[in-house]
Image (cartoon, rainbow, N blue to C red):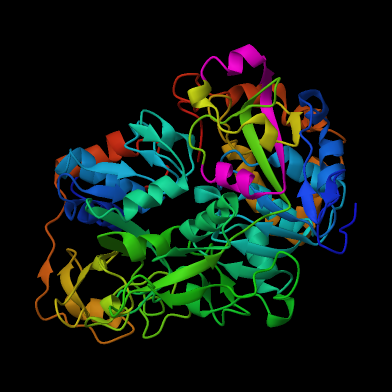
Amino acid sequence: MKYDLSGTLRLGNIMFDGILMKPTTAAADKFMSLAEAVGRFIPDGAQIALGGFTINRNPMALVYEIIRQKIRDLHVVCHSHGQGLDLLIGAGCVARLEIAYGGNGRFAPTCVRFRKAIEQGRIQWEDYSNYQMSLRFLAGSLGIPFIPTKSGLGTDLIRREGFPREIRKERKVASRKCVVLQNPFLEKADDPVVLLPALTPDVTLIHAQQVGEDGTVRIRGLTFTDIEQAKSADAVIVTCEEIVSRSQIRKDPDHNSLPPFLVDAVVPVPSGAHPTACGFYYDYDARHLNHYRKMAEDDQRFEQYLTEWIYGVKTHGEYLDRVGETRLAEIRADSVLGYRQGLERR
Amino acid sequence: MQDGFSSYSRQEMMAISAGRLIRDGDILFAGTGISMLAATVAKRIHAPAAVVFFETGGIDPTLDELPLAVADTRVMSGTCLNSGLIDAFSIVGHRRLRTVAFLGAAQIDRFGNINSTCIGPYEKPDIRFSGSGGACDAGCLASEVIIFMQHEKRRFVKTPDYLTSPGWIEGGDSRKRAGLTRGGPVAVVSNLGIMKFKPRSREMFLAEYYTGITPAYVAEHTGFPIDTSGAVESLPPTEEDLRILREEIDPQKLILK
């Protein structure tokens, strides 16, 4: 897949007088395999937004497939991210990163491969805060070019630019990190605000609990910034624990998160967020996350990890065979609490 | 240290000291680790009407088990409301609410400005940390901030290598001049004692030191001059404080060492 001169991603979309017309995809055409979803929507150099937050609902099955397909030069945009981001960076898929926080909670207060990549200057990065990144996705979802906030005033987040000037003219890179402006509604008072550039990623990757046969998405528990990330993107890929009938997902529409026409690809992948948590389905795999941190600390052992858990398995099913039925049963969530009570988490 | 209630660790003292600073009805913005313990201590011991909430969007979870990340499914369980980040930050900065944020950092200066981004030059850091997360947002928007620190000279510094989250900026009214209309740090809880900020100059001073520590020891481990003249010894935790912390809040010893 290639970008045309106007910078529009060609996904079988129609260009009409320079305006991107997105034909509504029939529900059945959205359902596809991981390999197809990544192959069709994530070319080298794409800007991708990662859904989820640190150790919860990371789109891990998609991350593994991106790594297997050796996609390169990705520009990742996210707020707080953990396991999925760390693997993409470690496997050499990421060239650029706009981020608020790279950590796995208690399992890695700073993500290891993220830390190494920055310390060794192997990626370009730009720091924002969680609220700032969420607002940037919100602005993108609303179709406005920037959004004001009070957050960041008086800090290096607004004083220090991470991206080098020469990339500031490139596709999907803001011309400046942010702009501080006086409140234009006041004539005299000193009331500065920070203007943040909107984000419109090429693709947003989300892992949800359920998708209806019609393509309606249901996220249970906290939605983080997933909905804004999805609405700001040119394309959305959703992996999910299960597909449910159209009538079932429309029985409680108050609990639904995204309408079908915003979703371009749906891939049913049970345990598709492992080793991160997926509320009401499974808890995070504390043992796996601890093991990962130890492997990530050393370059050779990290390669071993990639071979064992990603390159050495062809499908997510094979990956889960490696995790093992016993382990998956141990982390299975309580259907009322949403997590696994008494799970060994040290 | 933790076998009997007569002895206690510095980490336990930090959680209990920070918990004491919370008033009933406060809305607490909690992070992970010790701030999670402090928020739970406050709610179970001193301030039962306080509400613990998380930047991820979970409000007032039951916290039957300790969350190990702010996105842990445990922050979504038994809540009054689950939402997302935009909603959560609308609460942190809400003009009707008194919100108290717990933050931790790698470096702090005498005005309570903190660094959780990097050590060394930003462009080529010697050590990179996780980054702001919601710390910058809480520092800008919350009505009060309480900061947890390991008390070492290399962490209490003249100039942090990066200013991630604003404190009193350059002291005096500089925070207001920067455009921040409320908030600012009220206390720094370290493993040696509690620091507060002078009302006008906004400079850090030693308010309390823990049993077994002296004001001179605190000054020695601080990388800038600090006024210790008014400092008093902290009250030790009660048996009941320690029992609740060890047996009810963190029985699995997930955070307590």
Q: Classify B242 as above or below B208.
A: above
Instruction: Tell me what residue is drawn at x 60 percent, y 33 percent.
Output: A258
The boundaries of the magenta stretch are A224-252
Res A55 seen here: no
The picture places residue A166, in percent across and down from the top left corner, at: 73, 81
Res B160 seen here: yes
Q: Is residue A50 left or right of residue B89?
A: right
The picture places residue A80, in percent across and down from the top left corner, at: 55, 53
Q: Is residue A241 left or right of residue A135?
A: right
Name the residue nearer the viewer: A173 or A102.
Answer: A173
Q: Classify A212 as above or below A44.
A: above
Quarter of the figure with residue A241: top right
Q: Is residue A161 left or right of residue B246?
A: right
Query: Which residue is farthest right?
Result: A1
Residue A251 lies in the magenta-colored region: yes
The picture places residue A165, in percent across and down from the top left corner, at: 68, 81
Q: Classify A103 as above or below A156.
A: above
Q: Is residue A58 left or right of residue B55?
A: right
Residue B179 lies in the magenta-colored region: no
Instruction: Tell me what residue is drawn at x 17 percent, y 44 percent.
Output: B25
Name the residue nearer the viewer: B255 or A91.
Answer: A91
Quarter of the figure with residue A237: top right
Instruction: Tell me what residue is drawn at x 80 percent, y 23 percent.
Output: A28
Name the residue nearer the viewer: A346 or A268.
Answer: A268
The picture places residue A327, in percent across and down from the top left corner, at: 65, 26
